[in-house]
Every structure is written in C-alpha cells, then in structure tokens.
Amino acid sequence: MDISTTVNGEQVSGEVEPRQLLVHFIRETLGLKGTHWGCDTSNCGACVVLMDGRPVKSCTVLTAMCEGHEIRTVESLEVDGELDPLQQGFHERHALQCGFCTPGMLMTARALLDENPDPTDQEIRTAISGAICRCTGYQNIVSAVRWAAEHESATKQEI
Amino acid sequence: MQTPAPFEYERATSVEGAIAALERLGSDARIIAGGHSLLPMMKLRLASPEYLIDINDLAELAYIREQDGEIRIGAMTRHVDLLKSELLARRFPLFRDAETVIADPVVRNRGTIGGSLCQADAAEDLSAVCSAAKAQVVIRGAEGERVVGMEDFHVGPFMTAVGAGEILTEVRLRMRRGAGSGHEKVERRAGDWAIAAASAALWVDGGTIDDVGIALSAVGVTTIHLTRAEELLRGKPPSDELFAQAGVIASEDCSPSADGRGPIDYKRHLAGVLTQRALRRSAARALSEEA
Ligand SMILES: Cc1cc2nc3c(=O)[nH]c(=O)nc-3n(C[C@H](O)[C@H](O)[C@H](O)COP(=O)(O)OP(=O)(O)OC[C@H]3O[C@@H](n4cnc5c(N)ncnc54)[C@H](O)[C@@H]3O)c2cc1C
Ligand code: FES
Ligand code: FES
C-alpha cells in the first residue's frame, strides 16, 4: 500500500506492506538507524519515537497507522551541529555507556521536557519507566535530564 | 524478528464505516485501536486477522464527559487521558489509581479503554476497574445500539459480548452519592502486568453500605467478580473487620495459576490483602465524600 507521512519535518512517501512495523520503516526504508530495535515486545523502550509529539514504541505501531501523522526520531534532535540540551546533558553527566538505550531515552525525555519543563527526579523516573537501561543504573540519566531542564530554562530566559 | 502474518489494512473514517467494513469482511476482520494488545499477539501469530480496520482516526470516540448523571467515556480514550482526567479522579478515583500502574507511560499513550475491555484478558486492570465501578458499555452494530452491564460483558477468557459486525463505542459510569473507590495492584517491576490486583467501589448512605462492587485481576481465567463478598457487605456499616472477611472470601473465590509471577497460595494471599486495602481506601474516600 502507498503511504505518506512526515518524518523529522519532511514529507516521505513510499510503498509498504501493511504489516510493516514503524521501527523497520524508519531503520530499513528510510535508513535512519538512530532508532534502535531491542526487545521487539514493547517492553524495552529502545525504539521510542515521537508520534504527534507523544512518545510511542515504534515496534508496536504499524507504518500504515502513521499516514497523516508526524514522526520525530532521534536524528531530529541535533540541528546544524547544535546538540539538543538533552544530548548535551547526556554528554555532561555520562548518561550512557553502551548507548543502546540512548535514542529511546532521549526521545522519551524530549517529550517529558516539552510537556513539563521542570520535572522532579521522580517525574523523570516515571517518564522513563518504560525504558530499560542495562548499563547506567539510571542515576546519571535522571541527572542528565535535570541538566537539560536547567540549561533549557536558562536559555529561554536569555531569549 | 517478529512480524505479523500478511493482512489488508483499512482506515475507518466513521463509526458507521467501521461497522460496515466489519459486516462486509466478516470474521476475518479485526478492529485495531491502540494495537498494544493486538499487535503483540499478531507478532507472535496468536492472532492472524486477514483485515485490520484502524479506528484511530475516530476522534468522535475519544472523550470523557458528564451527561445525564453519568460519566461517559469514548472507546478510543487512551490510558494517558484516563489518568489525567480530573472528572474521573474526583468521581471514580480508582481509575487514576489503576492508570498510574497500567503498563508504562509510553504504552499508555497508545492503549485505549475500548481495546482493554475488548481484549478481555483477565490480567487487564481496567476490566476489574469497570466491573467494580458497575460500568455499562455501549455496543453498536448496523441495527443500532445496545447497553450491556459489565457483569454480562466478559463471557469467557478473551471473549466479550461484542458480536460479529459490532464495536464497543462507550463506557458509562453512573454517578451516585456517597461514592468511594480504589484500585490496588502488586507488580514485579515498573510497567509490568499485575501479580494480582483488586478494584473496589462503595456507595455509602447514612453510614451503611448501600451498594458495592469488587473485582480482581490476574487471579483467574477471567476478571473475577466477588459477588459473595459484595453480598456480605451490602447493608452493613463499613468496618475493618468486615473488610477482613471480604478479604478471606477473595482468597477463597479466586482461582490463580502458578507462573513466573508466583505460586498459587501466594496469589490467593495477595488477592485477600489487596481486596481489604481497596475496600479500606474506598470507604475512606466514600466517608469523606459523604461528610
Ligand atoms: C508492555 C505492555 C505492558 C502492559 N501492561 C498492562 C498492565 O499492567 N495492565 C493493563 O491493564 N494492561 C496492560 N497492557 C495492555 C494495554 O493496556 C493495552 O493497551 C490494552 O490492553 C489494549 O488496548 P489497545 O487500544 O491497545 O487495544 P488493541 O490492541 O488495539 O485491541 C485489543 C482487542 O480489542 C479489540 N478492540 C479494540 N477496540 C475495540 C472496539 N472499540 N470495539 C471492538 N473491539 C475492539 C481488537 O480487535 C483486539 O481484539 C500492557 C501492554 C503492553 C504492550
Ligand atoms: S524494541 Fe520496541 S520496546 Fe523494545
Ligand atoms: S547505556 Fe547501555 S543500555 Fe543504557
């Protein structure tokens, strides 16, 4: 079937099998390998992308369901060499080791900060509770999201 | 890699259109709502529908509103919106209790109340919640609508009163005075299904229990309605001793099976404790409402 949707602000269209899962469309059809594919059972959160601004597990969404919707992947975070405050925060606070969970963590946290620019540690932990990290023990991820929240609000005040 | 078997996909643009598609395509067609129960089953080839009818565009089925003394919830209302609803939190707080612990926030962005009830998985929290709250559901087909009480909705494991060519459109909750409710769940880790969960709702009038609903998740092949405990409580003043007796009945009347989440005696024990807690919480809320 023919499908057209918006990925990272660009209109994309193509022919897909109705049974194709969004994660494979993003990785294989579009070649955007930043979105990771882990458990394949909607448990790990590695495949999280934003659909109309809300985080969803792309291993449990059909590409066909995205027609007419906006998808955002981790590749959209950096703009013209400028890192998203979350990416910078993950760097500053050492919030990754192997990096497998990172794209999903970043997109989940992006949606959190868009909705709640000043989350508590508990709110951050709740938001990422659908994402598994086998390396960091989460502490540094929470700290990185706080870092981003603080720097983002500082930047906004300057403007 | 888990991939569903091939199927044809169609997007409904109206409830009537979805029903017409179901009629036209027959038993090989399935509705897809949030897809967070159906797609995992299709990936495991536990379900292989030949046609999927996507109802995600039906914005007319996504609402929580007050009407004619009831709270009416559209079938496409997602977990996240049930969690955030102040109306539900005020009138039926067991919804918020449950929604904070159903799956994880990302799954809650997709899963719907209609999908949860129609999945009719005994481990679902919302089936127990709606049973305890004595909800009614609206089922629509080409011939029109019918309203079915939760006690008649789940006809067996993974089986509901929704017939061929029909879809669930709405959940209705009657608002009555002196209401209090609660949902208690124990899970192995954040985002997991319940080891056991108990939902309760009480309606207190003049210091006695006028009506009560109690239901259990994950401790039987279907959602368990604790009718024997409900009968015990009706007409009596709420008390911890009474709730302890209801807990004993819960342990007796559930029928859990042993699995990775625990052995049978542990689950029976848990069902009893959670029933007591849900009743105590409901009573505290009902009495503060009555005062
Ligand atoms: C990782 C994970 C953890 C989870 N943990 C929990 C948990 O702790 N507690 C819990 O309660 N749930 C849990 N769930 C299930 C989640 O709540 C699902 O979203 C829900 O069960 C199904 O809703 P859905 O909208 O995704 O339904 P779908 O998957 O789209 O549909 C489910 C079934 O209902 C039918 N259907 C859907 N809508 C209608 C309708 N309007 N009329 C007629 N038939 C319809 C479909 O044909 C299908 O047979 C979990 C899911 C996942 C993936
Ligand atoms: S790959 Fe989608 S949640 Fe794990
Ligand atoms: S950094 Fe390795 S899984 Fe999170």
Image (spheres, helix red, strand yellow):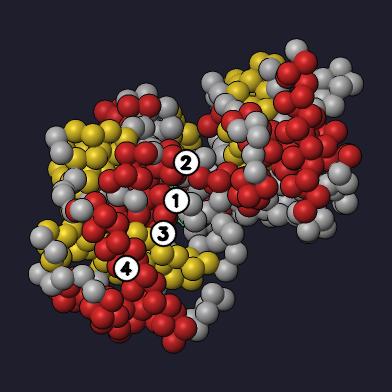
Dot 1 crowding, Cα within 10 Å, few <14, some 14–19, many 20+: many
B22 and B229: which is toward the camera? B229
Quick check: B158 above or below B228?
A: above
Q: Are marks 3 and 4 in contact (CB under 8 Å)?
A: no
Q: Are marks 3 and 1 in contact (CB under 8 Å)?
A: no
Q: Earlier in the sequence, mark 3 or mark 4?
A: 3
Q: Are marks 4 and 1 in contact (CB under 8 Å)?
A: no
Q: Amino acid at mark 4?
A: Arg
Residue beneath disc 1: B99
Q: CA distance from mark 3 to mark 2?
A: 16 Å
Q: Chain of mark 2?
A: B
Task: Judge left or right: residue A68 versus residue B114.
Answer: right
Q: Residue at x 16, y 70 (%)?
A: B237
On the image, the x and y values in percent for residue B216 come to 34, 68
Q: CA distance from mark 4 to mark 2?
A: 26 Å
Q: Earlier in the sequence, mark 3 or mark 1?
A: 1
Viewer-nearest of discs 3 and 1? 1
Q: Amino acid at mark 2?
A: Val
Indicate if the residue with disc 2 has its beta carbon within 8 Å of ligand 1.
no
Residue beneath disc 3: B124
In this rendering, does residue B33 appear at all? no
B219 and A146: which is toward the camera? A146
Q: Residue B280 shows which numbered tag? A: 4
Q: Amino acid at mark 3?
A: Glu
Discs 3 and 1 carry the same chain letter:
yes
